[in-house]
């Protein structure tokens, strides 16, 4: 009997110790993290999404960036090219920025939100009317919004109105991933790292910079074929970056 009591005491002690240990190591969520958690859960529950994957040859794009920086006087990031290509593609395929309602309305503006890793958490500044802006204008605005995001100086207007989203983890060495469609949009483009790959084209073998791309789209209003055409258009635009300048 005494042995059973001893075992019971040890069991209770271990449970209390583990519970206290977990409480001591508990890391509270920030307000932004709680907001993101709530919004992403809402999206997963209300937006039944499908996923498409493709690869984009960005060899010429990478080679063009230094020349464009000298020409425009602003650093042209890969994100600027992606945002520009998405905006043009959304104008050609407007259902990608549609909304679920009685008439499946299409948004009257193409506002591209792009994810930024800031000290206070993940934030998504928005480039408004991106289809009406040049590559240089997008690059300058992206740089300014990114700086404000990391300094926690974004205004409410600068994070509202997103109709399509971009998330790029290439800088973190991630090959590919699937994004979650934001509650205010119906599409998100997820971009991975650009790797050197050996490609055979027209009988010629060469090393190319290839970036993986994944598209998540809300199946309530967007069909797989329509989304595939949208993604293929983006890939083709990136392969010929001169037309994005």
Image: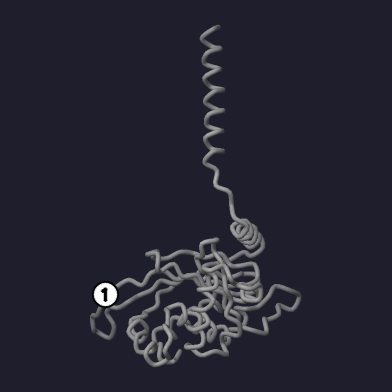
Residue occupying the point 70% across, 77% down? 104
Which of 102/81 is in front? Answer: 81
> Residue 99 vs residue 153: left or right?
right
Which quadrant is home to the C terminus?
bottom left
Percent from the top left, x then y, of residue 10?
Answer: 52, 19
- Asked where in the image residue 24 lies, by quadrant, the reply is top right
Mark 1, residue position:
198
Q: How is the image coloured?
A: one colour
Residue occupying the point 30% across, 78% down? 208
Secondary-structure class at tag 1: strand
Disc 1 packing (10 Å; few <14; some 14–19; many ≥20): few
> Residue 202 vs residue 170: left or right?
left
Determine whether 118 is above or below 135 in the image: above
Which of 163/197 is in front? Answer: 163
Percent from the top left, x then y, of residue 71?
Answer: 39, 93
User: Residue furthest toward the top?
Assistant: 1
Which quadrant is home to the N terminus?
top right
Which of 89/232 is in front? Answer: 89
Percent from the top left, x then y, of residue 205?
Answer: 23, 80
User: Residue furthest toward the right?
Assistant: 102
Residue occupying the point 65% across, 74% down? 160
Determine whether 3 is above or below 243 in the image: above
Residue occupying the point 65% across, 58% down? 38
- Asked where in the image residue 220 lies, by quadrant, the reply is bottom right
Percent from the top left, x then y, of residue 158?
Answer: 62, 76
């Amino acid at each position: 009997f005494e042995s059973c009591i001893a075992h019971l005491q040890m069991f209770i002690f271990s449970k209390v110790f583990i519970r206290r240990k977990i409480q001591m190591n508990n890391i509270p969520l920030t307000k932004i993290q709680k907001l993101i958690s709530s919004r992403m859960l809402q999206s997963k529950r209300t937006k039944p999404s499908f996923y498409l994957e493709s690869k984009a040859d960005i060899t010429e794009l990478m080679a063009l960036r230094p020349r464009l920086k000298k020409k425009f006087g602003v650093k042209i990031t890969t994100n600027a090219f992606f945002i520009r290509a998405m905006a043009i593609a959304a104008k050609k395929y407007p259902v990608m920025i549609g909304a679920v309602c009685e008439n499946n309305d299409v948004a009257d503006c193409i506002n591209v939100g792009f994810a930024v890793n800031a000290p206070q958490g993940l934030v998504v500044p928005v480039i408004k009317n991106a289809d009406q802006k040049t590559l240089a204008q997008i690059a300058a605005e992206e740089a300014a919004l990114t700086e404000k995001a990391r300094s926690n100086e974004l205004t409410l207007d600068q994070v509202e109105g997103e109709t399509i989203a971009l998330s790029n983890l290439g800088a973190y060495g991630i090959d590919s991933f699937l994004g979650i469609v934001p509650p205010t949009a119906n599409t998100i483009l997820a971009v991975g790292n650009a790797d050197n790959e050996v490609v055979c084209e027209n009988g010629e073998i060469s090393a190319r910079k290839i970036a993986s791309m994944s598209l998540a789209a809300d199946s309530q209003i967007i069909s797989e074929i329509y989304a595939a055409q949208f993604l293929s258009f983006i890939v083709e635009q990136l392969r010929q970056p001169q037309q994005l300048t």
